[in-house]
Image: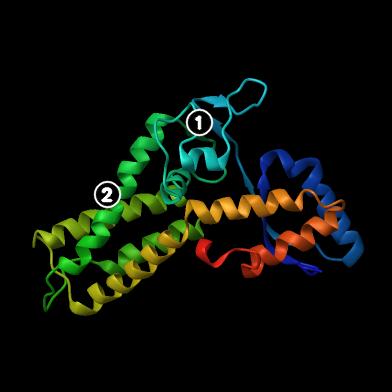
């Protein structure tokens, strides 16, 4: 009803590859005569303080506890964008470990990136450009085309930070067209970051929790999927 006979990308943890996803392929192929998914993206495990997350050992944390600082593992709350920034440091197929030290370091890295974006409006334009923006942009796309290699992409973003700082110090030059393009992109980026708030996350989680009260899986899907696809069910102040 919602996905059709086939769709492009299916995510999930490596622990679901067998038997869940293999059964999904078998069922979809048997029903429709075609494999249901074009690309499978199985994410590896998220660990904390070097240990597997487990309720039995007490070594686990919920998303909102990390965002709101209501836990015994981290010294402060973290902006959702910082958490996302942290997760992008590792390839999705690699193990990612979070700790207080790692999150604090990622917060500094994220702030450094955002500070560089604010410098764009202060850069003086020139009649010639000494920086190769086209090659840098291609390197970013190449990273993402290489199995969503966010690790390399993040390295490229900090190469851009170096370029921005050199431009600010007038050790490099850039023409108006290239700078304006970067300014436009930075405005869009900041807008997206600001839209991703803890309040929106809380509303989403509350909606999922209420859906769990439905008696059947279909009823739960009917309640949650429209919100995910169209934003229905989210209060305007949380968007």
Q: Position of residue 211 (x, y in %)?
A: 75, 53
Label at residue 48: none
- Res. 232 image quadrant: bottom right
Q: Earlier in the sequence, mark 1 or mark 2?
A: 1
Give the SS element for disc 1.
Answer: loop
In the rendered image, the residue lying farthest to the top is 57
Q: Residue at x 35, y 42 (%)?
A: 107
Q: Is residue 63 left or right of residue 218?
A: left
Q: Mark 2 sits on what residue?
A: 112
Give the percent coordinates (x, y) of residue 182: 29, 70
**Relative vertical location of residue 213 with respect to residue 219 in this rendering, above or below:** above
At 37% across and 41% down in the image, what residue appears?
Answer: 106
Tell me: 24 left or right of 16: right
User: Within 10 angstroms of label 2, few (less than 14), some, or many (20 or more) residues?
Assistant: few
Tell me the residue at 88%/67% (across/down). 32
Q: Position of residue 214 (x, y in %)?
A: 82, 52
Quarter holding residue 130 = bottom left
Badge 1 density bin: few <14, some 14–19, many ≥20, Cα 10 Å: some
Give coordinates of residue 58: x percent, y percent: 60, 23
Query: How far apart are the alpha carbons under marks 1 and 2?
Result: 26 Å
Q: Which mark is residue 71?
A: 1
């Amino acid at each position: 009803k919602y996905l059709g006979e086939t769709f492009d990308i299916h995510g999930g943890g490596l622990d679901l590859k067998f038997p869940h996803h293999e059964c999904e392929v078998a069922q979809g192929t048997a029903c429709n005569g075609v494999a249901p998914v074009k690309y499978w993206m199985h994410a590896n495990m998220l660990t904390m303080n070097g240990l597997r997350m487990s309720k039995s050992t007490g070594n686990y944390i919920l998303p909102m506890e990390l965002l709101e600082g209501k836990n015994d593992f981290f010294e402060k709350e973290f902006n959702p964008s910082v958490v996302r920034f942290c997760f992008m440091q590792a390839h999705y197929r690699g193990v990612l470990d979070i700790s207080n030290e790692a999150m604090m370091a990622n917060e500094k890295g994220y702030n450094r990136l955002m500070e560089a974006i604010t410098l764009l409006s202060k850069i003086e334009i020139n009649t010639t450009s000494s920086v190769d923006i086209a090659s840098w942009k291609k390197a970013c796309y190449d990273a993402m085309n290489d199995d969503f290699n966010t690790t390399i992409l993040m390295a490229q973003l900090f190469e851009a930070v170096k370029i921005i700082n050199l431009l600010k110090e007038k050790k490099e030059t850039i023409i108006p067209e290239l700078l304006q393009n970067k300014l436009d992109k930075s405005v869009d980026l900041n807008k997206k970051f600001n839209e991703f708030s803890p309040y929106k996350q809380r509303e989403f989680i509350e909606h999922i929790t209420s859906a769990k009260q439905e008696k059947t899986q279909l009823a739960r899907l009917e309640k949650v999927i429209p919100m995910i696809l169209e934003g229905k069910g989210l209060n305007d102040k949380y968007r």
